Amino acid sequence: MANGIFLSQAKYVTYLLAHFHMSDFKRDPMPFQSDVRFTIECATPLVDATLYLKLIGSLIFLTHSKPDLCFAVSMVSRFMKKPREIYWQAAKRMM
């Protein structure tokens, strides 16, 4: 490459997929469903907050090279205080 800077986080993404036990998952062409409405009053069970925070933090870091994830990551990052299963599934779908 003669001019410019090329950012790639392929190694980091591979590490994250292994860390969250998602290495064998298939890629989803639509990582965020726009018709899903997230609310604080959700009936799904709570998930491990520490693991959820790690996943959200990792996704936030990825938005530096994948700005198309910014909106979706901002939606799931709103629920870090009481993470529920539905938010966990949405965040995993982004991976």
Image: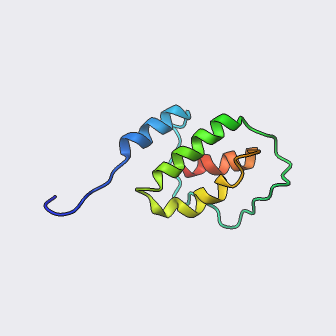
Is 51 situated left or right of 82 in this image?
left
Residue 24: percent from the left, percent from the top? 51, 37
Q: Look at 32% across and 54% down and name the residue there.
A: 7
Q: How is the image coloured?
A: rainbow
Above or below — where is 14 with respect to 27? above
Is 2 situated left or right of 29 in this image?
left
Q: Look at 58% across and 42% down and name the residue there.
A: 55
Quarter the N terminus occupies: bottom left
Between 79 and 28, the one nearer to me in the picture: 79
Tally the marks: 0
Instruction: Determine the residue located farthest toward the bottom in the rendered image.
Output: 35
Residue 62: percent from the left, percent from the top? 46, 51
Above or below — where is 55 with respect to 65? above
Instruction: Determine the residue located farthest toward the left in the rendered image.
Output: 2
Is 37 situated left or right of 71 in this image?
right
Quadrant housing residue 73? bottom right
Above or below — where is 38 with respect to 46? below
Quadrant housing residue 3? bottom left
The reply to whether residue 86 is visible in this rendering is yes
Is 27 situated left or right of 1 in this image?
right
Between 89 and 54, the one nearer to me in the picture: 54
The reply to whether residue 23 is visible in this rendering is no
Between 37 and 65, the one nearer to me in the picture: 65
Residue 82: percent from the left, percent from the top? 77, 45
Q: Look at 69% across and 55% down and name the residue there.
A: 78
Q: Look at 59% across and 60% down and name the residue there.
A: 72
